[in-house]
Image (tube, rainbow, N blue to C red):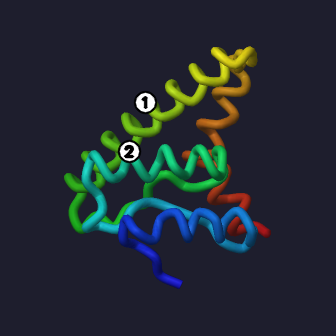
């Protein structure tokens, strides 16, 4: 099932919550704008927690890979800071261990856990 447009993001995120054989990753090339990537990443964090892959590479040249990953890391950083701030304001302060675990899941472990099932 290929879902790529902005309008389909909520549907695919809900499907991923219900079916653990779906792994949400990255943003389709034509949705890969700063505004949409941030909106989609925040929605995924709200509904899935750190159980998706925030970015993939469909880069055609090395320069695309570098800028896409720099932008992806910046988006995830902002979204996580905001999410942890909300949690802290609600009374739960994440430890450095929690933060490191979530970042490792998003940028490393989720992929390997999914393909090694």
Q: Mark 1 points at which residue?
A: 78
Q: Position of residue 55 (x, y in %)?
A: 44, 54
Quadrant of res 7? bottom left
Q: Which element type, helix, strand or loop, lies under badge 2? A: helix
Report the side of 71 relative to 105 (left or right). Answer: left
Instruction: Name the one closer to the observer, 85 or 107.
Output: 85
Instruction: Name the one closer to the observer, 50 or 42.
Output: 42
Precedes in sequence: disc 2 or disc 1:
2
Q: How many labels does the image show?
A: 2
Mark 2–mark 1 CB contact (< 8 Å): yes
Report the side of 62 relative to 23 (left or right). Answer: left
Residue under the point 46% across and 38% down: 76
Q: Which element type, helix, strand or loop, lies under badge 1? A: helix
Specify the label residue 38 is tagged with. Answer: 2
Q: Does residue 98 lie above or below 115 as drawn?
A: above
Residue under the point 75% across and 18% down: 92
Q: Where is residue 59 in the image (x, y as percent from the top left)?
A: 28, 64
Residue under the point 51% across and 25% down: 81
Q: Which residue lies furthest to the bottom in this view?
A: 1
Q: How far apart are marks 2 and 1 (CA)?
A: 9 Å
Specify the label residue 66 is tagged with. Answer: none
Looking at the figure, which quarter contains the C terminus?
bottom right
Q: Position of residue 79 (x, y in %)?
A: 47, 34
């Amino acid at each position: 099932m290929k879902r790529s447009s902005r309008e389909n993001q909520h549907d695919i995120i809900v499907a991923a919550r219900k079916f653990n054989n779906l792994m949400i990753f990255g943003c389709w090339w034509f949705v890969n704008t700063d505004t949409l990537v941030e909106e989609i990443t925040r929605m995924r964090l709200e509904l899935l927690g750190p159980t998706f892959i925030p970015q993939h590479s469909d880069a055609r040249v090395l320069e695309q890979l570098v800028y896409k990953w720099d932008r992806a890391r910046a988006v995830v950083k902002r979204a996580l800071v905001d999410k942890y701030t909300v949690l802290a304001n609600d009374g739960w302060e994440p430890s450095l261990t929690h933060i490191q675990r979530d970042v490792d899941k998003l940028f490393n472990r989720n992929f390997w856990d999914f393909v090694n099932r």
